[in-house]
Image (tube, rainbow, N blue to C red):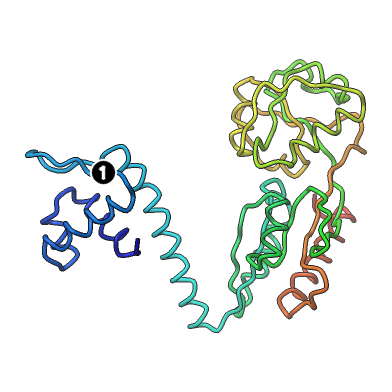
Amino acid sequence: MELRHLRYFRVVAEELNLTRAARRLHMSQPPLTRQINQLEEEVGAKLFSRSTRGMTLTPAGQFFLEHTLQILEKLDTAVAGTRRLARHHRELFGIGFVPSVFYGQLPLLVRQLRQKDDIELTLAELTTVQQVQALKAGRIDIGFGRLRIDDPEVVQQVLFDEPMIVAMPTGHPLEGTRPTLAELAEYPHVLFPAAPRPSLADIVLGMYRRRGLKIEVVQEANELQTTLGLIASGFGITLVPEQVRRLQRDGVTYTDLADRHITIPILCSRRRNEAPGPIMQEANAILEVMVENRRSGRYP
């Protein structure tokens, strides 16, 4: 299967007419028909239903189209980024992050690095485990996560420890209090993320487990926004890092815990034994200022 097969398929799926599709592709209809037939043979499924009334996508064809569009979009993005790098002589710098760190200082780092004319930034939302894999594969240069990973090729630095808070439905019986974990354990919980694991969900479960507490998990979600939506709907409560408080959502109230020493780290992951280049030195300098500001209370 070649990329031209996917491009031909996309145009035919958009037109649902071989004559119009061939005209868009600047080719005659018989070769296009052969290409689509070859694609169906290789995939092993009929992608189009053909009748006197015209063409329609089969369920298999609709599924294949959705993934084809994603592939072609990623390819177009890669080509455009490559051309931009070559045109402006920029150096690529990849950052991986877990969602809960993007509501604090990380956007400041991104903003300052983007101001540099010689840097092309790429951002990837990845769990800490995925960040370690991406670092080792060279897909990113630095990662920001929550989970401690023991890997000989990666070094992790604790930037600071962040207090945990509870997100609860507005009007919850514990609203306006500073609850303990024992009090929270009496109520249903929503966990985030559901997968892949291990993740923040396992850290939260461990906080209860170490205190001999067991919680009822009524729902799990992969996205932070989905989790907050479930909480706003009254499904349950959850523990989140303090930075998430910046993410305001109708129907959700954030409350401090009784014990402000219940914290979670923000970890910076880099490749071990790799001499920092100019961009990494710039990133490290920005991080030092950000961490000092955080520790001194100049911003949350």
- Say which residue appears at 19% left-offset and 40% top-offset: 49
Q: Compared to 279, does 155 lie above or below?
A: above
Q: Quadrant of residue 153?
A: bottom right
Position in image of residue 32 (x %, y %): 17, 60
Does 209 sit left or right of 25 as displayed? right
Position in image of residue 43 (x %, y %): 34, 50
- Say which residue appears at 49% left-offset and 71% top-offset: 81
| Mark 1 closeness class: few <14, some 14–19, many ≥20 residues within 10 Å | some
Position in image of residue 299 (x %, y %): 80, 53
Q: Nearer the viewer, residue 149 or 125?
A: 149
Q: Nearer the viewer, residue 153 or 157?
A: 153
Q: Quadrant of residue 60?
A: top left
Name the residue beneath numbered marker 1. Answer: 46
Q: Quadrant of residue 108?
A: bottom right
Q: Compared to 247, does 283 lie above or below?
A: below
- Say which residue appears at 78% left-offset and 41% top-offset: 242
Question: The residue under label 1 is which amino acid type?
Answer: Lys
Does 234 sit left or right of 156 as displayed? left
Position in image of residue 39 (x %, y %): 28, 55
- Say which residue appears at 14% left-offset and 50% top-offset: 17
Q: Secondary structure at mark 1?
A: loop
Quarter of the image with the N terminus is: bottom left
Q: Nearer the viewer, residue 226 or 29?
A: 29
Does 290 sit left or right of 31 as displayed? right
All told, the count of numbered labels is 1
